[in-house]
Image (cartoon, helix red, strand yellow):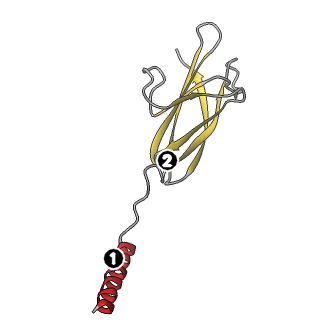
Amino acid sequence: MQKMKGRLISLIACCLIAWKCEQPLEAPEGYYNGTIEGKVYYDPDNDGQFEPAPLAKVKLDEHPLLPDTKPKTLTDSWGYFKFEDVEPGEHVIWGSKEGQGSAYYIGKKKVYLEKRGNAYVELKLHAWP
């Protein structure tokens, strides 16, 4: 009788393990997120020659003139920026930079991020009235 109980418990345990293995695994939150990075350029002399835009403001999915509620960053001295842990899908990268005097530069670019993907964006800012 004791042997029978042991076999029954083993059988139930095997069934539970097999059932659990057949269940689809659910990815942890953020598992499919990726990275969007790139460079921002502007034309400070309005001569058609774009150069890296240091300390430009870069925002993810939010117009640069709106209050900051979405992820944002500043470019480094070479115009480089990076957003990590970004959900897959379509995004808009907005960039802006104050120039000398009252000059202001703005630009945007759409990018599609695949699951667990990385996207590289080159964004050109143009003078804004």
Residue 38 vs 34, above or below: the answer is: above
Q: Which mark is residue 16?
A: 1
Point out the tag, 1 or 2, that comes first from the N-terminus: 1
Residue at 59% from the left image edge and 24% from the top image edge = 126
Helix, strand or loop for disc 2: strand
| Residue type indicated by callout 1 | Leu
Pointer 1 with pointer 2, Cβ within 8 A: no
Residue 37 vs 33, above or below: the answer is: above
In the visual, does 109 lie left or right of 55? Answer: left
Q: Position of residue 107 (x, y in %)?
A: 54, 28
Q: Quadrant of the N terminus?
A: bottom left
Residue at 31% from the left image edge and 81% from the top image edge = 12
| Residue type indicated by callout 2 | Tyr
Residue 20 vs 38, above or below: the answer is: below
Residue at 67% from the left image edge and 23% from the top image edge = 43
Q: Around disc 2, counting alpha carbons within 10 Å, would you say few (fewer than 14), some (14 to 19), or many (20 or more)?
A: some
In the visual, does 123 lie left or right of 26? Answer: right
The answer to which quarter of the image holds residue 44 is top right
Residue lying farthest to the front in this orientation: 2
Q: Which residue is mark 2?
A: 112
Separation of marks 1 and 2 at Cα, in angstroms: 41 Å
Q: Position of residue 92 (x, y in %)?
A: 48, 37
Q: Nearer the viewer, residue 42 or 2?
A: 2
Select label 1 or label 2 by which is in front.
Answer: 1
Helix, strand or loop for disc 1: helix
Q: Around disc 1, counting alpha carbons within 10 Å, would you say few (fewer than 14), some (14 to 19), or many (20 or more)?
A: few
Q: Position of residue 61 (x, y in %)?
A: 45, 34
Q: How many marks?
A: 2
The answer to which quarter of the image holds residue 82 is top right
